[in-house]
Image (cartoon, grey):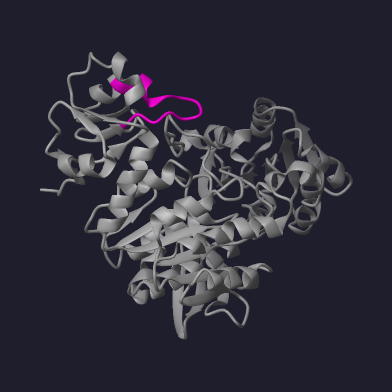
Amino acid sequence: MTEPLWTGEAILAATGGRPIGNMPESITGVSIDTRTVKPGEAFFAIKGERFDGHDFLSAAVASGASLLVVSEKRLPALARFSIPLLVVDDVLKAMERLAVVARMRTRANVIAITGSVGKTTTKEALRHALAACGTVHASAASFNNHWGVPLSLARLPEDTDFAIFEIGMNHPGEIRPLVKLVQPHVAIVTLIAPAHLGHFRDLQEIAEAKGEIFEGLAAGGAAIVNADDPFGPHLANMARAAGAMRITSFGEAATAEYRLMRYQKLDGGSSMEARIDGVNVDVRLASAGRHLAQNVLAVLGAVDLVGGDLARAAAALAGWRAGKGRGARHDAALPDGGSFQVIDESYNANPASMRASIAVLASTEPGPGGRRVAVMGDMLELGEHADQLHGELAQPLAEAAVDAVFLVGPAIRVLADALQGQIACQWFGSVQELQARLKEYLKAGDVVMLKASNGIGLARVVEGLVVANGHADEVATPETSAQPAG
């Protein structure tokens, strides 16, 4: 029988709430979304930017929740519920208090990851690698903001061997309180890039904000920074100032402790040789992309720092694939029986990840008679830099031997002007217009890469292309959520 995540007594003590009714003996999980709540879980009725969890309590009960954590202010309207209530001053703060206790009681080696790009991919690859070394708990999806981090901590089983948390931000000062909840033994910064640049003066300020992750390191903690990133030395200094006992780096630079020695794209994936703190490790990956190989360096470095079995972790990575919207590949059927390849990079975008995705397209050979097609949408939150950063994508597209470019969104229209006379390019004002034209255009042997900020909606285009092969699936987002942070 599986051990309960919490006892009713423990969750009561941790949150400091007031019980109405008999607290359940055991709590099997913690949820803030009635679409995913499971029997026996505690439902925390968090008030988000778009929804208030108190409006979904009946649905939580219908799904089998055994405890409702609710605000004192909303209590007068809740007399109809017969299951136990835990009444608190503020539901999100109560979940944060539960997160603090979860962190105090765990024996896990804890790793935290941030960066402008590659956070979720690195987290998922690390989850897969460490699963070969012990039990692993990791943030679900991109649960990396002010509700996602405490929720992920509150779900941390007491007897886990390794725990991995993704931490994002849109503004300065947002990482600091979250990492102080997590208290990682290892903190990773993947890369500094112009994501959310509209909220910052410059890249230096973004680096300062990402470097806050080192302020929460547990005693004796270690830092991993990117040796190929111009901000790597500055981040190392921030880690040193925060008290990191060991500072390491990953990349292709000769100074990196976790260094990429060889990378080769293969049919159906790629292979790499890494030197991890003096030990050579061969890794076969089911996904392609040099940027993924660089993320894997950080993964193997983290495995090494937390005492995982490096050989087992490296072997396990052969079974890991880039996720939905982050480089997943699909063969999509055509009505006439032919097929084309879809590279799904639709989850999010900034200038660095756009360039990485273009490089992946460049390294992918079309089928017989096929073409390389780039479908790209706006990169959001770039502020006054938007025109320049969108226009600068013309050069990597030209160098990638792309045959056709489809653009959607007001901000990226400048790229159509920049590409004039270089590559066949069409711009569309809406995703619906783009989708209709793209379906007419694609033919057997083509390889099409789709990339944009999440708010543009290219995920719907991907689903429309690949649903015939049964690859499209929905990922529910918490009904109380704002967008995950970057």
**Outermost bottom residue:** 278
Q: Is residue 327 above or below residue 82?
A: below
**How many numbered callouts?**
0
68 with respect to 410 (left or right):
left
163 with respect to 189 (left or right):
left
Q: Tell me residue 230's x, y (percent).
A: 69, 69
Q: Is residue 257 above or below residue 14?
A: below
Quadrant in the picture for residue 294: bottom right
359 with respect to 77 (left or right):
right
Q: Tell me residue 172's x, y (percent).
A: 61, 50
Q: Is residue 178 above or below residue 470?
A: below
Q: Tell me residue 301's x, y (percent).
A: 45, 73
The residue sitting at 86% across, 46% down in the picture is 418
* Residue 25 in view of the camera: yes
* Residue 365 in view of the camera: no
The residue sitting at 39% across, 36% down in the picture is 92
Q: Is residue 98 above or below residue 435?
A: below
The residue sitting at 31% across, 14% down in the picture is 77
Q: Tell me residue 410's x, y (percent).
A: 76, 33
**Outermost right residue:** 421
Residue toward you, 400 or 51: 51
The residue sitting at 58% across, 55% down in the picture is 117
Tell me the magenta residue range. 44-57
Residue 56 among those drawn in magenta: yes
Residue 242 among those drawn in magenta: no
